[in-house]
Amino acid sequence: MCMLSRKYKKIYYACLSLITFVLLLHNLHNFQDFSFSSLKTSWGKKGSFCFLSSSDPSGRGPLCGGTSDMAPTWGVLLTMCFQRDSVESTEQHKALYETVIKKWLSGTELPIFVIETSGYQLNFRHKRLWYFTFDDAQRKTVGSSSILEANALDRAVRELKELPEARDITHILKVTGRYFLEGVEEQLSRHAVLCSPVLLLQTHRKEDIKWQNSEYYGIRKDALDLLAHRVLQNGQAMEQSLFTLSTLLGYTFLGPGFTNSQPRGGDRLVINPL
């Protein structure tokens, strides 16, 4: 093969990048109402780039070019609902959630964002805590926890877009409000390159039924609304939508799991490690 001049090499690599992008769009054609804002390339300090890719569902991540030294900036999003059907249940959840919030504040250096869906006003403040509450009218009429969770995510996306303190955050660690993940900052530091898989997931994944546990996951901030809209528009379970999105956009697992003794809501199952 003849030697290419520097000019034509640039054209050659630009064409390869374009072909990669077109193939990605082809792979995503069945993903309804996909937000193309998530397909933005990620530019590092050295001008490196990253295309989100569905070509590698094994978890090795997206197709990247160059070497990026730009680390992601993480924020924690806790989803909670304080008000319950009885005074006793409300008091139990109040005690649980306030304890968990304080654990995140004392056990990490991360900014903590709470989205609460019953209109409950928290009675304490912290410089790293941002608390958003609204009364979701559907919580008493809709039996699907996935719909309620998606409503919370949709509201959180809008709140974070308006919050100056969240402007520089690139990735969100979403955690169901009853859980604290001991040592999560160390785990997140192992994924310290911005040009990395869009999703960091629990190891609890079932390929045969297309199911991905969603007690926690890490996600690019500009892809969070994709998950919420998938659930709201298609009526899928959150776990099914998360599985589909992770297959399309790329994923890896966040650690081997976290020690847990807190039962989940509903069936009260204790998942350990979480």
Image (cartoon, rainbow, N blue to C red):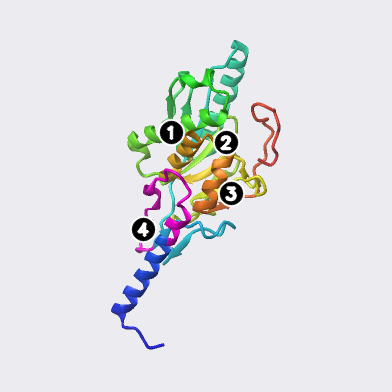
Decide which of tag 4 and tag 2 comes sooner along the chain.
4
Residue that protrudes farthest toward the left in the picture: 7
The image position of residue 197, as x and y in percent, is 50, 54
Q: Secondary structure at mark 1?
A: helix
Looking at the rendered structure, the kind of residue marked 1 is Asp
- Measure how far apart labels 1 and 4 are at the Cα level: 26 Å
Q: Amino acid at mark 2?
A: Ala
How crowded pointer 1 is (Cα within 10 Å; few <14, some 14-19, many 20+) is rated as some
Q: Closer to the N terminus: mark 1 or mark 4?
A: 4
Q: CA distance from mark 4 to mark 3?
A: 23 Å
Q: What is the magenta range?
A: 23-48
208 vs 151, left or right, is right
Q: Nearer the viewer, mark 2 or mark 1?
A: 2
Contact (CB < 8 A) between labels 4 and 3? no
Q: Find numbered disc 2 in the image and state the secondary structure of the residue it sits on.
A: loop
Instruction: Verify whether residue 138 appears in magenta.
Output: no
Q: Report which quarter residue 94 is drawn in.
A: top right
- The quadrant in which the C terminus is found is top right
Q: Residue at x 37, y 65 (%)?
A: 18
* Distance Cα–Cα, label 2 vs label 1: 15 Å
Numbered mark located on residue 154 in the image:
1
Q: Is residue 273 visible?
A: yes
Q: Which residue is mark 3?
A: 254
Query: For mark 2, what is the residue?
Result: 237
- Residue 177 % position (x, y): 56, 30
Q: Are marks 2 and 3 in contact (CB under 8 Å)?
A: no
Residue 259, quarter of picture: top right
- Dot 1 and dot 4 residues touching (CB under 8 Å): no
Q: Tag 3: residue type? A: Leu
- Kindly identify which residue carries mark 4: 43
**Amino acid at circle 4:** Trp
